[in-house]
Image: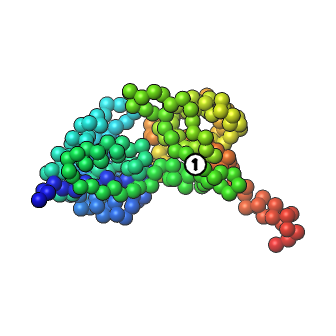
Amino acid sequence: MNENGKVYLIGAGPGAADLITVRGARLLAQADAVLYDALVTDEMLELCPQAEKINVGKRCGRKSAAQLFINRLLVNTARKHRIVVRLKGGDPMLFGRADEELSALDAAGIAYEVVPGITAALAAASAIARPLTKRGVARSVAFFTSSTAPDQPEQASVPDCDTLVQYMGGREAALTAKRLLAQGRKPGTPVVVVENASLPGQRVWHTTLAALLHGLPDADGPVLVMVGEALAARQSATDFNAERLHATGGL
């Protein structure tokens, strides 16, 4: 008989506590232990007052838990508790090192389930009221990051899609702009930068690819760099109605 507990990899969503899924919130309320990322807010942790809370967050350029340590801790915690939650910012399956943690659980014979979450790109698009796809303008989207493991080569190119969303892109913004311009993107291509999507400290910058060459202001929170014509300013309702009247001759 397997006496190990079960691990739930849960997406905490982009930051705001009320953007976690209903299933995720229900499991947090039942958890015996929660291993949480650096971007998980105190408000989110209020959803699991009964649980042992273990901070295993990683932030770029800051002292943080090593992934192998997290893997071992996750296995050991599941051997002591019935319900263990691994709470990850955004969605666990996108830039979340989920494969490494699931592999460790597989090797240890521990059952698990993945609960999806709203990834930051979708929250940012909602926050600025700009779709990532747009009829006649953008039919493809790529999520990417330039961050790599120490033993991996630096990413030398950027995906070729109508709309691009770069995660963890604050420090890489100027280099990303340089690469996109070299790949033939227009200097005036709209760029929207969102810091702390969905949180009270959210900040938004509207700029262009040419201006992005000069980099971004310093940011404390996670930054998304969103590039593409779908992010251009939308016509006002007045402009739209005037255009429609001219085209149709009336309502």
Q: What x and y, as percent, mark residue 185?
A: 68, 36
Query: Label 1, on which residue?
Result: 141
Q: What x and y, as percent, mark residue 41?
A: 35, 49
Q: In the depicted view, which residue is nearer to us: 46 or 245?
A: 245
When the figure is inspected, residue 58 is found, relative to residue 23, above or below; the finding is above
Q: What x and y, as percent, mark residue 127?
A: 54, 53
Tell me if I can see residue 193 in this picture: no
The residue lying at 86 percent from left, 63 percent from top is 246
Q: In the depicted view, which residue is nearer to us: 185 or 151?
A: 151
Crowding near pointer 1: few (<14 within 10 Å), some, many (20+)?
some
Q: Is residue 105 left or right of residue 243?
A: left
Residue 227, picture quadrant: top right
When the figure is inspected, residue 174 is found, relative to residue 73, above or below; the finding is above
**Which quadrant of the rendered structure holds the C terminus?**
bottom right
When the figure is inspected, residue 220 is found, relative to residue 77, above or below; the finding is above
**Which quadrant of the rendered structure holds the N terminus?**
bottom left
Amino acid type of the residue that numbered disc 1 sits on in the rendered structure: Val
The residue lying at 85 percent from left, 64 percent from top is 247
Q: Is residue 47 left or right of residue 183?
A: left
Q: What x and y, as percent, mark residue 214?
A: 61, 28
Residue 193, picture quadrant: top right
